[in-house]
């Protein structure tokens, strides 16, 4: 086993979905939490501790379908702070996914 890869990660997510205009719906969410690793990080006299948060917004149009799939555009900002420098990062991005409701 690798105890430095085993962790507990309590987190909380708050979200809101609302109609904007012309059938466009927005879902906004904020997630925050921490990871507490169990074993000492290899080569360091400490256990790894991370804190993270993510802000995400997604947009979709109710009556827009492409080959039976609905496109969803997402934008996000994610930050992770860690006591092990290699795991500290921030990222901002955009994604496009296609969903099908059953």
Image (cartoon, grey):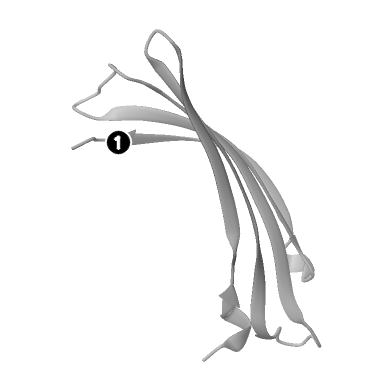
Picture quadrant of residue 69? top left
Q: Is residue 62 above or below residue 51?
A: above
Residue 87 visible in the displayed image: no
Give the tally of numbered discs.
Answer: 1
Q: Residue at coordinates 59% horizontally, 73% vertically from top-left? A: 8
- Residue 19 image position (x, y, % from top left): 44, 18
- Residue 5 image position (x, y, % from top left): 58, 79
> Left or right of 85: which side holds 10?
left
Q: Residue at coordinates 24% horizontally, 35% vertically from top-left? A: 100
Mark 1 = which residue?
A: 99
Q: Residue furthest top?
A: 22
Crowding around mark 1 (Cα neighbors within 10 Å: few <14, some 14 to 19, many 20+) is few
Q: Is residue 1 above or below residue 15?
A: below
- Residue 64 image position (x, y, % from top left): 29, 18
Residue 15 visible in the displayed image: yes
Q: Residue at coordinates 27% horizontally, 16% vertically from top-left? A: 63
- Residue 30 image position (x, y, % from top left): 60, 42
Q: Is residue 37 above or below residue 71?
A: below
Helix, strand or loop for disc 1 = strand
């Amino acid at each position: 086993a690798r105890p430095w890869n085993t962790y507990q990660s309590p987190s909380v997510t708050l979200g809101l979905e609302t109609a904007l205009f012309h059938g466009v719906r927005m879902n906004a969410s904020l997630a925050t939490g921490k990871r507490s690793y169990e074993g000492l990080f290899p080569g360091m006299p400490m256990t790894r501790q991370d804190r993270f948060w993510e802000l995400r917004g997604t947009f979709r149009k109710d009556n827009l379908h492409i080959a039976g799939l609905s496109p969803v555009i997402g934008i996000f900002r994610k930050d992770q702070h860690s006591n092990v420098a290699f795991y500290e990062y921030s990222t901002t991005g955009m994604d496009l996914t296609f969903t099908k409701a059953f």
